[in-house]
Image: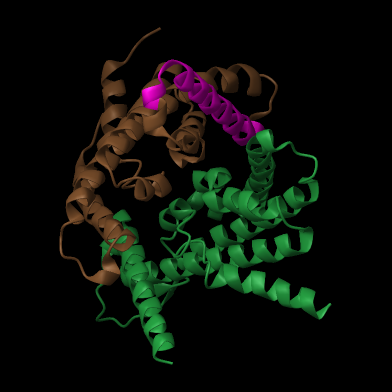
Amino acid sequence: MNNRNDCFKKCLLEGICSNNPIFSLMLGLCPTLAVTVTALNGVTIGVAGIFVLLGSNVIISLIKGFIAPQVRIPCFVLIIAAFVTITKLILQAYMPLLYAKLGLFVDIMVVNCIILGRAEAFACKKNVIPSIADALGMGIGFTLACVLIGSIREILGSGAWFGIKVTGAGFNPAIAMILPPGAFLTIGVLMALLNNLNEIKKRRSKLI
Amino acid sequence: MEINVARLIGIVIASVFVNNYVFSRFLGLCSFIGISKKLEVAIGMGISMTFVVTMSSIITWPVYHFILVKYHLEYLNIITFILIIACFVQLVEIFVCKFNQALYKALGIYLPLITCNCVVLFVTLLNTQNETSFLESIVQGFSAGVGYALALILITSIRERLELAPIPKNLKGVPIAFMIAGLMAFAFLGFSGLTLE
């Protein structure tokens, strides 16, 4: 029992840190950059991502024995598309304002490489419990990355965080940060910083 | 049927320059970063992308208007479109493999990857959302492909030269590619002042 718990935790942590879908696997970049104008948008797309990942990973790991390997990709895509449609209808019904902001980027999640990639690399080989852990870990990692990028862009670009003003009156927001170029620059700088951190870690472990 | 040429040209300019699919809508970024290393591959990818996007706009328009709308199944559009695109890409792959081995080898795994490119699905969904006419949908699809190819070829030519440039070690590879994409997005922002009637 203890062993199984450890495995669950390991899968969960891997998705959040060492195998973060955005910064280390570089999957699913499009929604991450497109909608993260504000931190709130980042949270929404992240939660939608967790839901779709969880649903598709569970279903795929349950039916993996019945799908012929030649047609597995179309089957996966169909299952994912069904979950994305559910998400879209829920968002449209209960959060129409947010849906209007995110627009087609919720629909586009069907072809998000994180979801298909996890289905192909993980869920179709493992049992249900590890698949749930993997989906949660990847989803949370994706959400954190979206919120991080969204926060940086919102604070620098409009001087607010989750819609609340956080900077003083003397701060002149850089509008470029909420325009497209800001997204590219933010993720470029973040990736360079992460590379640097990994480098320092490696050097330390060598010294010891 | 009346054909409004000015409007069609407007669509082309809007989606190639003003709202470039890569630089201002952030679509197709995975392949944009992933395969922008060699110019020949980038050109091949750009051409096959353009072909697939155009053809899928041609196929999805009648399916949406004559089947989904007729039976009030509009909410199934995502599922239907992704199936059509996946099948179509598979078909293209079989054809290319059968008739042009050289091209097939050059494109390699990039051909099946087009299914997973967000540009294709986005354009078909955009066409249904904006309720464009058949001809406009085709033009929209074609110019989306051209815009994507333009962005891909531009960044590949820059990245080929960057290989030789002295860059800080931590910036090498993907981070610098993103920063260059950011600078190019600044340049493309210059087009946003254009208004088209």
Left of A66 or right of it: where is A83? left
Q: Is residue B57 above or below residue A182?
A: above
Front residue of this view, candidates B10 and A112: A112
B97 drawn magenta? yes
A88 drawn magenta? no
Instruction: Give the residue furthest to the right.
Output: A1
Tell me the residue at 26%/31% (across/down). Answer: B13
The count of marks equals 0
Left of B31 or right of it: where is B70? right
| Colour-to-chain, brown | B
Q: Is residue B39 above or below residue B83?
A: below
Q: x, y percentage for residue B36?
A: 31, 46
Q: x, y percentage for residue A204?
A: 40, 88
Instruction: Give the residue furthest to the top.
Output: B1
| Colour-to-chain, green | A
Q: Which residues are magenta?
A: B75-103
Q: x, y percentage for residue A205?
A: 44, 86
Residue A96 shows up from this direction: no
Left of A124 or right of it: where is A176? left
Tell me the residue at 58%/26% (across/down). Answer: B87
Q: Main secondary structure of the magenta part?
A: helix
